[in-house]
Amino acid sequence: ALQAGAARGAMSDRRRRRVGGVVAVVPLLALQAGAAGGPTSVPGLDELGDLLTGKYAYTQSFWEDVQAFYHAVDWKNDPWLFGLFGAEAIILLIAILNRRQWERLSVVFGVNCLILFFAERINAFAGRHWKEFSTQMYFDESGAFAGVVLGVPLILIQFLIVIFLLKDAALMVIKVKRIELRKDIAEKRKAQQEKKDD
């Protein structure tokens, strides 16, 4: 009866293990069954769904996801991350400083597009050579880590550039309309002056 009660309650319990710097969640039921000499059962889709989204999900909020990400990364021993963030900050600074020059913004936008286009290949290359510059393997096939540290900042910069370009285009439309109105007023005055002279 004690084992049956433990097996029923085990689905709600989870054990967290650090595996290669990434936090993994393992249901206790499979561990207890394997330790007791019984067959290890593979959780079904419903049980996995409950682990990810149910009452006992690994994280309950975005803030917890951010904290899990922060603690999974070895910030002290991977200075290349700060180099990457520094390069992204420089790109952001270039975009802000050149916000009134659409030609330069277009170049920055194009460079960002190229980086984002080749992000999957960059992730695969980094995954093959991670031991040369990193202490952990961050570059999985899905590209989640590269998407967070490379893709998201560059996409946000792209949105900012689009906002700058739209603002510039709106100001240009306003200038053109003002010039057209001045031209129309000047033509009307000229036409009225010609009528008076006749």
Image (tube, rainbow, N blue to C red):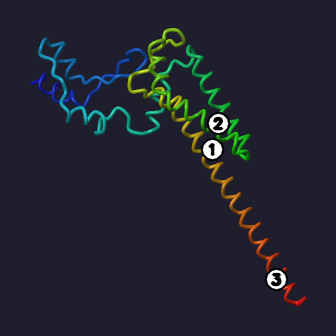
Residue 32, quarter of the rendered image = top left
Q: Nearer the viewer, residue 81 or 88?
A: 88
Instruction: Tell me if mark 3 has few (under 14), some (14-19) or many (20+) residues whose alpha carbon lies within 10 angstroms of its own.
Output: few
Cα distance between the residues tagged 3 and 2: 48 Å
Q: In the orientation shown, which residue stands out farthest toward the right? A: 197
Front in this rendered view, residue 164 or 149: 164
Kind of element beneath mark 1: helix
The residue located at (72%, 63%) in the rendering is: 176
> Of circles 1 and 3, which is in front?
3
Question: Horizontal and vertical percent for residue 162?
Answer: 60, 47
Q: Residue furthest front?
A: 198
The numbered dot on residue 108 is 2
Q: Position of residue 76 (x, y in %)?
A: 57, 16
Which image quadrant is residue 75 in? top right
Give amino acid for label 2. Answer: Val
Query: What residue is rendered at 21% in x and 33% in y?
Result: 47
Dot label at residue 191: 3
Q: Nearer the viewer, mark 3 or mark 2?
A: 3
In the rendered image, the quadrant that contains the C terminus is bottom right
Quadrant showing the N terminus? top left
Residue 13 spot, x, y in % from top left: 26, 28
Question: Who comes first in sequence, dot 3 or dot 2?
Answer: 2
Q: Secondary structure at mark 3?
A: helix
Whole-angstrom CA distance, mark 1 to mark 2, is: 8 Å
How far apart marks 1 and 3 lie (CA) works out to: 45 Å
Disc 1 + disc 3, Cβ < 8 Å? no
Looking at the rendered structure, the kind of residue marked 1 is: Ile
**Earlier residue among tags 1 and 2:** 2
Left or right: where 190 falls relative to 78: right
**Dot 1 corresponds to which residue?**
161
